[in-house]
Amino acid sequence: MPTITIDPITRIEGHAKVTIQLDEQGEVQGARFHVTQVRGFEKLCEGRPFTEMPALMARICGICPTSHLLASSKACDDIMAVRIPETAEKLRRIMNLAQITQSHALSFFYLSSPDFLLGMDADPEERNIMGVVRKYPQMARDGIKLRQFGQRVLETLGGKRVHPGWIVPGGVSHPLQADHRDQILAEIPEAIRITRSALQWFKGQIENFRAEVRSFANFPSLFLAMANDTNEFSAYNGWLRFIDANLNIVADHITGTDYLNYIGESCNDDSYLKSTYFKPLGLADGIYRVGPLARLNMCQSAGTTQADEELAEFRELERHSVLSSFYYHYARLIEILFSIERMETLLNEPEILGKNVRAHASPNNFEGVGILEAPRGTLIHHYRIDQNGLIESANMIIATGHNNLAINHGVFQVARQFVKSKKLEQGMLNRVEAVVRAFDPCLSCSTHAAGMMPLDIQLLSADGEMIDRMRR
Amino acid sequence: MPRTLLLGYGNTLCGDDALGPMAVERLRALLPGAEFISCHQLGPELAETMAVFDFALFLDAACDGEPGTVHVERLSPSSDQAASLTHHVEPAALLELAHALYGRAPLAMLVTGVGESFDNHEGLSAKGNQALEEICRIVPRIVPKPLADLPTME
């Protein structure tokens, strides 16, 4: 059977490939997204003191280390059974919002904007960030400026842009200085201007991408995101909620103690990336999506003025939930706007300069779970420790794993629409890549499960009969 | 007085990959007029920073070559590696971005020290230390020269 392989997928974080199977008539019969790298963090942290986990887990990824720091620290808070000081919680929330800002800016401006600005069918020699730099330098400068802003907040608070060690079990290591707060606040108007400008531009482009809107993982599915009592956008505090495509709540008030009743994980024999699914419906029917699209479908309001205006317009795209994964890009921009506005609010609160920023305690629980919304979606860190505070086991569920089934579904959907064996064009293949890119997968993060992948080797005869088999 | 930037990059948790950042720490005392950046990796955000300098010296570790040796090369802006950039860019691509977006790129050189151990640990190997010493010996001598010899790219 003829197979088209796209390897590697470009402009994503990590290494992956897609295979598309054609039938004898040359029509697409199947398509798969394979992640070909492995990291192994769940295994290598066993035996380490739990207090080391935030710093260790941050090394999972160079793009979203702050998200892992936060989720890991929340899991450690849970192990210590402490409620962190109010100032510390607000500072952590600012870090999370800055992380969302810089990560989304990277995804939109650096990775995806070549497709929007130069066209899906543009020459691949041109359809890249340098093409954007040459033809749309202001857009490129804006992208750099916006990401710089997010990174500067991380650096100002955490001491460095990548792998800051400021977030610790029990809170943060030191308080925010007034001059540092003022530096961040001074940059906010420009960051908002850039985001609004990008939003205006993107909304004007949607009409040009109708075919992509229709085919980019556009299907009814469940959505998972953090929820709270106010039904406002929530990225740090709250519980987990599943909704369906009609915005009905399917499961609610899911916490660290019972998430395993709702989220199942399945290993794949052709990829290092596990697939998660909504357990009550099983692997076949339990497909769900996380991340910006899920979060905007989930919340009733953003909770900030400008983001709420944009959210109202976003909701007009569809009658119920917004289903096309092409709109992840749109949702990202709205989330950037929300994040900047919320950061401004938090930084202007007087207690943000408070000196009490850390709670100290020894382990009081043998188990701890930390959950938050990372840029790409729901992030869960779950640790078990022994009597000496050493990690016995760790389970991390990362956004890209949550989205794996949806990514595969989307790849198949796009392949069927755009890939015709008799007329292969770069733009068609790029659309298959682009649907993966819409989810902004972070493969470094998500392939952390060394030793977990089942290995099944079958020796088949020429007529397909299995003559030997090894399984692990 | 030309503005000079020394930029050391590498992962300090991967043995000799820390050569760049460690060289920066050592060279601060030896080159008081210069400015320094130490980072994990080069990101596109550094393009704007680059554009305000007259001379930039990138300090990096290499795994190919004779461990302990140091290599110096002149850099020119190049878009070859910038096309696929994500969160990491090569020095020449960074210069290209600075030039294309901000109208100016500094004259630049790349100094690489060849290490022998890039495993997950902190600290340099014996050969890594040898390369570090050589970098600290060479850099103070080469920093002023390009400034006198070469025109600024506009």
Image (cartoon, helix red, strand yellow):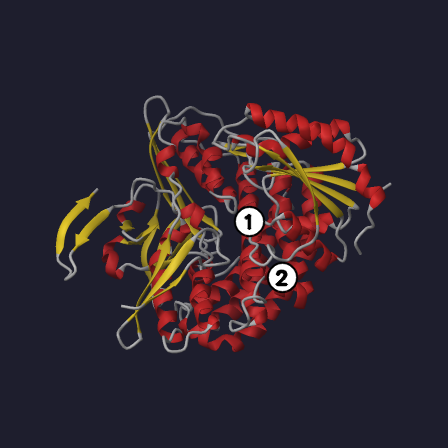
A11 or B92: nearer the eye?
A: B92
What residue is shown with label 2?
Answer: A130
Number of residue marks = 2
Task: Please give the chain letter of the residue carrying mark 2.
Answer: A
Q: Amino acid at mark 1?
A: Leu
Circle on res. A228: none
B106 or A92: nearer the eye?
A: B106
Q: Nearer the viewer, mark 2 or mark 1?
A: 2
- Mark 2 residue element: helix
Residue A77 shows up from this direction: yes
Q: Taking A15 as reference, is B22 left or right?
A: right
Q: Taking A135 as reference, is B127 left or right?
A: left
Give coordinates of residue A293: x percent, y percent: 45, 61
Circle on res. A97: 1
Q: Residue at the spot x=25%, y=46% of the render? A: A454
In the image, residue A85 sits, relative to residue B124, either above or below, namely below
Same chain shared by disc 2 and disc 1: yes
In the image, residue A411 sits, relative to residue B111, either above or below, namely below
Residue at the front extreme of this rendering: B66
Q: Residue at the spot x=81%, y=51% of the render? A: B152
Q: Residue at the spot x=47%, y=46% of the render? A: A236
Image quadrant in which the C terminus of chain A is located: top left
Give coordinates of residue A264: x percent, y percent: 28, 50
Residue A318 shows up from this direction: no
Q: Residue at the spot x=48%, y=38% of the render? A: A59
Residue A224, quarter of the rendered image = bottom left
- Mark 1 residue element: helix
In the image, residue A228 sits, relative to residue A211, either above or below, namely above
Q: Taking A328 as reference, is B108 left or right?
A: right
Give coordinates of residue A410: x percent, y percent: 37, 66
